[in-house]
Image (spheres, coloured by chain):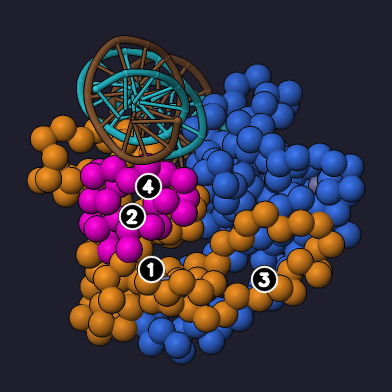
Chain colours: A orange, B blue, C brown, D cyan
Amino acid sequence: MPHDFPSMLKELHLKVTPRRLATLAALATATTYVSPEEVHKRLQGEFARIGLPTVYRNLEELAAGGVITKVLHPNRQLYYYFCPNRSHHHHFVCLACRTVEDLECCGLEEVEKQVGGRVLSHIVQANGLCQACLQAGREAAA
Amino acid sequence: MPHDFPSMLKELHLKVTPRRLATLAALATATTYVSPEEVHKRLQGEFARIGLPTVYRNLEELAAGGVITKVLHPNRQLYYYFCPNRSHHHHFVCLACRTVEDLECCGLEEVEKQVGGRVLSHIVQANGLCQACLQAGREAAA
DNA sequence: CATCTGGATGGAAACCATTTTCATTTAGGA
DNA sequence: TCCTAAATGAAAATGGTTTCCATCCAGATG
Ligand SMILES: [Zn+2]
Ligand SMILES: [Zn+2]
Ligand SMILES: [Zn+2]
Ligand SMILES: [Zn+2]
């Protein structure tokens, strides 16, 4: 079943523009997490004019709306990933081939009790080398 | 029992310099996580000449050595925190008053088994408002 | 204590991913 | 078809962080 990108955008009260649809398509097609710059490059194949700020803005809005996920890379650059798994979970990301695997653990529920305050956001992410990259002897990219 | 900063530095094969000792003292004294800029400001009260790059370098080395902890702020700036708890754990950080609370949950041990690859690093952090800030009606800072 | 050496440091400049500004275009409803 | 707020592009600014390199100093050696 294909993704209904227009509906996703409407639910976030975002206008359904060709650039946003192409951005979602690019992410959903990618097998790895990608940088804003890379999304921009790819969209340049579809649009004669496409600005980098637009890509940044749209990726941020989509991530804020939960449609896509941010990947916090140790190099402190920002990457994005479209995960078809709609339930709450976290990720293991490979620093060599950029593949993403779902993690089921979370433990956030206990945290709210422990803290007593309000948890506004939380990060749970494992970084490393996937099995394939480990066996192939590949190393973490910069 | 006071902290033995010289020994900490020696264990990391770092020279025991006045600036490094002062950096550790500043962090250990602070009740909140602090930015490199803030550490720099504080050290300016002790040293006539203290460069920002030195502060960045030393904080990074100390964090790499596990003596201090990085706080990944949603605003994507980097902060550091000296946690006296030497065992493996994670943090809840208040976005209003910057206090830090230890979290006991982790569960990342099993992740490596799940993944089959190698976990090089992992992030587990909850962000929000501590109980005090929540009751006082304070809001998350930029 | 004098000497030596590689690590540590400061200042200035570079870096560069990301954001802001603002004029123009467009989606979507009236 | 019109209208208006949202979306966009180009250019410029931003600013946290890093690099460069000459100088300094911690710590080892004799
Ligand atoms: Zn991999
Ligand atoms: Zn996922
Ligand atoms: Zn607080
Ligand atoms: Zn702690």
- Closer to the N terminus: mark 4 or mark 3? 4
Residue at x 78% of width, y 42% of height? B97
Residue B128 lies in the magenta-colored region: no
Q: Secondary structure at mark 3?
A: helix
Comparing labels 1 and 2, the label whose residue is closer to the camera: 2
Are marks 1 and 4 in one subunit? yes
Q: Which residues are magenta?
A: A4-28
How dense is the environment of label 3, judged by Cα within 10 Å: few (below 14), some, or many (20 and up)? some
Q: Secondary structure at mark 1?
A: loop
State the CA–CA distance, disc 1 to disc 2: 17 Å
Q: Secondary structure at mark 2?
A: helix
Q: Is residue A24 above or below residue B102?
A: above
The tag on residue A59 is 4
Q: Chain of mark 4?
A: A
The tag on residue A108 is 3
Q: Which is the main secondary structure of the residues drawn in magenta?
A: helix
What residue is disc 1 on?
A83
Dot 4 and dot 3 residues touching (CB under 8 Å): no
How dense is the environment of label 1, judged by Cα within 10 Å: few (below 14), some, or many (20 and up)? some
What residue is disc 2 on?
A6
Dot 3 and dot 2 residues touching (CB under 8 Å): no
Q: Chain of mark 1?
A: A
Amino acid type at circle 1 is: Cys
Left/right of residue A40 with respect to residue B1 in the rendered view: left
Left/right of residue B30 with respect to residue A122 in the rendered view: right
Q: Is residue C9 above or below residue A21?
A: above
Amino acid type at circle 4 is: Leu
How dense is the environment of label 2, judged by Cα within 10 Å: few (below 14), some, or many (20 and up)? some
Mark 1 beta carbon near ligand 2 (under 8 Å): yes
Amino acid type at circle 2 is: Pro
State the CA–CA distance, disc 4 to disc 3: 25 Å
